[in-house]
Amino acid sequence: MSPALGEMRVVDDLMERASRALLATEYFEAEHLCLAALEKAFQGSDFERMSRIVMPLQESRRQRRQQAADTGRVVVVSKALPRASEIESGMYLVEPPLIGRQARTLRESAERRRVPVIVIAREPLTRLGKWPIVAVGDGPRMPTSIRTYVDPPKMPPTADWFLRTNELLGDAAISKVKAGPAAWRVDELMHFLDAHPDHEKLHQALEAECRKAMGQPLPARARPGPMDDPSSF
């Protein structure tokens, strides 16, 4: 068996298990398996398999996000992050002096314990009276950040505010995707989705670009990063 064929079989096996987990409403397990399959397919530039993985991944995340919103529990975190054992299902607003990286740490801690949460990080109020909302990621190849600006809500924020703000943050990410070969756009969307996994249209945009990439030759070089474009700073 060739290495490529072996990798394809691994991806297919992961997705069979993910489908069973999704059917059994084991959403964290389904998400974990989908992510493992997506990463393997991405590393192999298997855009066809990637396009089929994204929708089950989106559904598993939608379900756990709804579980978090349905609690109605809002926690404002502006000092130390809660210990992993103290994290409860709900919606968390991470405020200064804490930063976006700590919001990611909180989300990842909850995911490891399989606790459904929505986590949003805000930065200090701007001169225009807006809250910068930020998400950060490590990405498959490079660090990534996304930022949008919203009016401060009446405190504490509602579940609708969390869901709406998540949408605005994801929309900001999609608007940043640059023109270029579909494979480059797949790469960029993978980075944005790593930073902000709670946006359905980001998943849909990734699926669409994967399908486009299936019909195009692979670019001769990798997508340029920020260090390749000094004007991006």
Image (cartoon, rainbow, N blue to C red):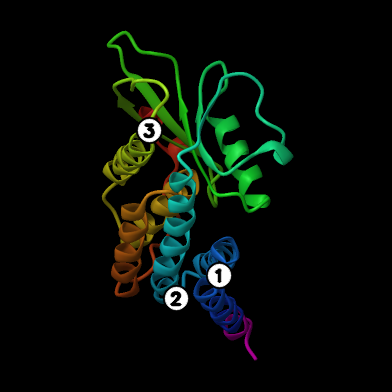
Q: Residue furthest bottom?
A: 1
Q: For mark 1, does the 10 Å Cα neighbourhood hold few (<14), some (14 to 19), or many (20 or more) residues? A: many
Report x, y in % for residue 31.
Answer: 54, 62
Contact? badges 2 and 1 (CB < 8 Å) = yes
Q: Secondary structure at mark 1?
A: helix
Report x, y in % for residue 158.
Answer: 37, 33
Q: Secondary structure at mark 3?
A: loop
Measure the alpha-carbon separation of dots 2 and 1: 9 Å
Give the left or right position of residue 55, taking residue 150 as reference.
Answer: right
Q: Residue furthest top?
A: 127
111 above or below 149? Answer: below
Residue at which label 2 appears? 49
Instruction: Choose mark 3 or mark 2, whichever is in front.
Output: 3
Contact? badges 3 and 2 (CB < 8 Å) = no
Q: For mark 3, does the 10 Å Cα neighbourhood hold few (<14), some (14 to 19), or many (20 or more) residues? A: some
Looking at the rendered structure, the kind of residue marked 3 is Thr
Asked which quadrant contains residue 122, the reply is top left
Numbered circle sitting on residue 158: 3
Asked which quadrant contains residue 151, the reply is top left
Contact? badges 3 and 1 (CB < 8 Å) = no
Looking at the rendered structure, the kind of residue marked 1 is Ala
* Residue positioned 45% across, 71% down in the render: 53
Q: Secondary structure at mark 2?
A: helix
* Residue positioned 43% across, 48% down in the render: 198
**Of the pair 24 and 197, the residue shown nearer to us:** 24
Instruction: State the extent of the magenta-drawn residues as a range.
Output: 1-7
Residue at which label 1 appears? 37
